Amino acid sequence: MILTSWNCRGLASKPKKLALKEWINNSNLDVIFLQETLGRAFEIEAMLKTLLPGWIFSAVDSTGHSGGTAIGIKEGRVKPQQ
């Protein structure tokens, strides 16, 4: 399993979204953890699901000192346990 973490410091800019998409599509990642997403969880999840089809995302709101986080799991590569 290949896992990576990226402190993205926000995902609002188009160049940053495109860089993230290119990086993930050109790597063999199974799980990605994004730190400091700087947004509301439902908006971050929707944007990431659109940007990266074939990935499942879950996010946490950016509140207080927390910059928000998101985790992505490549469908079919990792089976999350509940």
Image: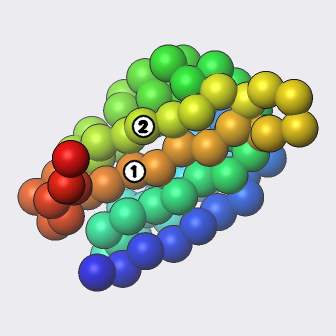
Residue 50 position, x and y percent, is: 37, 29
> Is residue 72 found left or right of 53 in the rendered image?
right
**The N terminus appears in which quarter of the rendering?**
bottom left
Residue at 62 percent of width and 43 percent of height: 69
Q: How many marks?
A: 2
Residue 18 seen in this snapshot: no
- Does 54 sit left or right of 30 as displayed? left
The residue beneath circle 2 is: 58
Q: In the rendered image of this protein, does residue 28 appear above or below residue 71?
A: below
Q: Is residue 31 left or right of residue 38?
A: left
Q: Measuring 46% from the left and 61% from the top, which residue is drawn there?
A: 32
Cα–Cα span, label 1 and label 2:
7 Å
Residue placed most toward the observer, 48 or 38? 38
Give the mark, 1 or 2, whose residue is nearer the N terminus: 2
Q: Residue at x 45, y 29 (%)?
A: 45
Which residue is tagged 1? Answer: 72
Q: Is residue 11 above or below residue 35?
A: above
Pick the residue in front: 33 or 52. Answer: 33
Q: Is residue 5 above or below residue 33?
A: below
Q: In the rendering, at what x and y percent does residue 75 appear?
A: 17, 52
| Secondary element type, mark 2 | strand
Pointers 1 and 2 in contact (CB under 8 A)? Answer: no
Question: In which quarter of the view is residue 64 placed?
Answer: top right
Q: Position of residue 52 (x, y in %)?
A: 36, 42
